[in-house]
Amino acid sequence: MCYNSRMLEKNIVLIGFMGSGKSIVSKRLANMLNRQLLSTDDLIVQEEGRSVNRIFEEAGEEYFRQMERKVVEGAAEKQSVVIDCGGGVVLNPENITDLKKRGILIYLSASPECIYENIKDKDDRPLLNVQDPLARIRELLKERRALYEQADYIIMTDNKTADEVCEEVIRILSHD
Ligand code: S3P
């Protein structure tokens, strides 16, 4: 792979809906490129000493978003890291502005059906802990699609392995 020196300094920022593969892809990318990995959810959980579910339950979504804003502000200042963003990071326009300053934003896009398959046996997404998660996914995706599409690049992840998605990211980086 060859990419120019400007690219070497840029952060690789993965955005997208819950269950679209951001975490696994960002881990692999960080390994492959020997870069530090920052996950906004992990940073919040570390700072709070409680799970995302518990933060939502005990302090509410608004509080979670404030924490998210704080960790995004810090992560966006870094250089040459991979940033795995929680699905709701795009809800705050300041997050996008900050992340774009030093980062190349890649939207991992998945269909509601694929997202549902990926999350259906998990209980760590408080926003999808509802009677009809697929309907909720469709609704939230509709609300958020334009926000995710502010990314510099979009990769469709349906029916692709994590390795295939990583290869696409690397192709993007080498041509940017
Ligand atoms: C959320 C996505 C989650 C987590 C929280 C809220 C969202 O992260 O931040 O449950 O609003 O889309 P993942 O996208 O990593 O699941």
Image: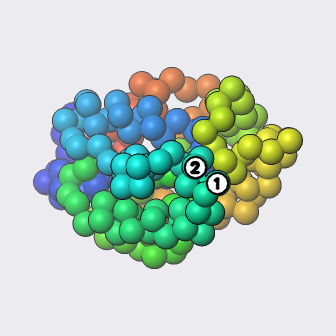
In the image, what residue type sits under mark 1? Glu
Neighbor class of circle 1 (other Cα within 10 Å; few <14, some 14-19, many 20+) is few
Say whether marks 1 and 2 touch (CB < 8 Å).
Answer: yes
Residue tagged 2: 54
SS at mark 2 in the image: helix
Q: Residue 165 location in percent, x, y?
A: 46, 32
Front-most of 161 and 68? Answer: 68
Front-most of 156 and 88? Answer: 88
Residue 75 visible at all: yes
Neighbor class of circle 2 (other Cα within 10 Å; few <14, some 14-19, many 20+) is some
Compared across the picture, whether 34 is left or right of 148 comes to left
The image's mark for residue 16 is none
* Residue at image location 20% in from the left, 58% down from the top: 79
* Residue at image location 63% in from the left, 63% down from the top: 60
Residue tagged 1: 57
Q: Residue furthest left?
A: 5
65 over 121 or under it: above or below: below
Compared across the picture, whether 175 is left or right of 1 comes to right
